[in-house]
């Protein structure tokens, strides 16, 4: 009788960066099976300077990483809107979201918002309500604490579905 394959469990943190509100969501991935572990929201104090707010984001995200010990991270790419100033600030928060897991030695993948939507809902232009509904379908025990946390869980789900291709692409790029 063939030995049963033992699938290892990978903990994936999804991060939906924002200067005011950064959502995070942690899932476990074992083969094709996904399960919710935790989610939350990181807030920065709007009364502080931009630099101080970035420090707040960095410190709080580092605490989340240290507490939950993810194996891999996925960050949503910046959505460019008509307000260039807001887009630049979002980009700076996104830099923190990329930096903190990388500093902890965690592989970081990046996904465009349309790719996250297409992976989770099946349509690249899905509405937020559709995304949040599918997050609850795919992770039945999840009760995201905010829309940003639900978005972060969607980013983690997207990575769970694409992580094999990401890993292969990185290995091929190194050879």
Image (cartoon, grey):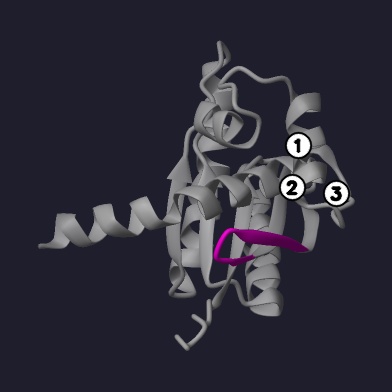
Q: CA distance from mark 2 to mark 3?
A: 13 Å
Q: Quadrant of residue 132?
A: top right
* Mark 1: few/some/many CA within 10 Å (<14, 14-19, 20+): some
126 on left or right of 96: right
Element at label 1:
helix
Q: In terms of depth relative to the viewer, which is nearer, 130 or 23?
A: 130
Q: In terms of depth relative to the viewer, which is nearer, 19 or 78?
A: 78
Q: Main SS of the magenta segment?
A: strand
Q: CA distance from mark 3 to mark 1?
A: 12 Å
* Mark 2: few/some/many CA within 10 Å (<14, 14-19, 20+): some
Q: Which residue is mark 1?
A: 134
Residue 139 visible to an observer of this rendering = yes
Q: Quadrant of the C terminus?
A: bottom left
Q: Which residue is mark 2?
A: 138
Q: Are marks 1 and 2 in contact (CB under 8 Å)?
A: yes
Residue positioned most to the front: 1
Q: CA distance from mark 1 to mark 2?
A: 6 Å
Check residue 144 in the rendering and tell me which mark sits there, or answer none: 3
Task: Mark 3 or mark 1: name the one nearer the start of the chain.
Answer: 1
Question: What is the span of residues highlighted in magenta in the rendered image?
Answer: 29-36
Q: Are marks 3 and 1 in contact (CB under 8 Å)?
A: no
Where 40 sits versus 50, above or below? below
Q: Name the residue located 28 percent from the left edge and 57 percent from the top edge.
A: 168
Where 60 sits versus 63, above or below? above
């Amino acid at each position: 009788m063939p030995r049963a394959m033992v699938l290892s469990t990978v903990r994936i943190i999804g991060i939906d960066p924002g200067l005011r509100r950064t959502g995070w969501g942690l899932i476990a991935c074992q083969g094709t099976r996904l399960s919710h572990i935790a989610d939350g929201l990181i807030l920065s104090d709007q009364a502080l300077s931009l630099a101080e707010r970035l420090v707040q984001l960095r410190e709080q995200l580092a605490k989340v990483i240290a507490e939950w010990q993810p194996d891999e991270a996925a960050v949503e790419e910046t959505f460019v809107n008509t307000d260039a100033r807001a887009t630049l600030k979002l980009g700076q928060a996104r830099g923190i979201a990329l930096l903190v897991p990388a500093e902890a030695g965690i592989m970081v993948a990046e996904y465009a918002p349309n790719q996250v939507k297409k992976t989770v809902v099946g349509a690249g232009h899905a509405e937020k309500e559709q995304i949040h509904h599918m997050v609850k379908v795919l992770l039945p025990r999840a009760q995201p604490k905010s829309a940003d946390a639900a978005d972060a869980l969607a980013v983690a789900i997207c990575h769970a579905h694409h992580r094999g291709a990401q890993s292969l692409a990185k290995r091929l790029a190194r050879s």
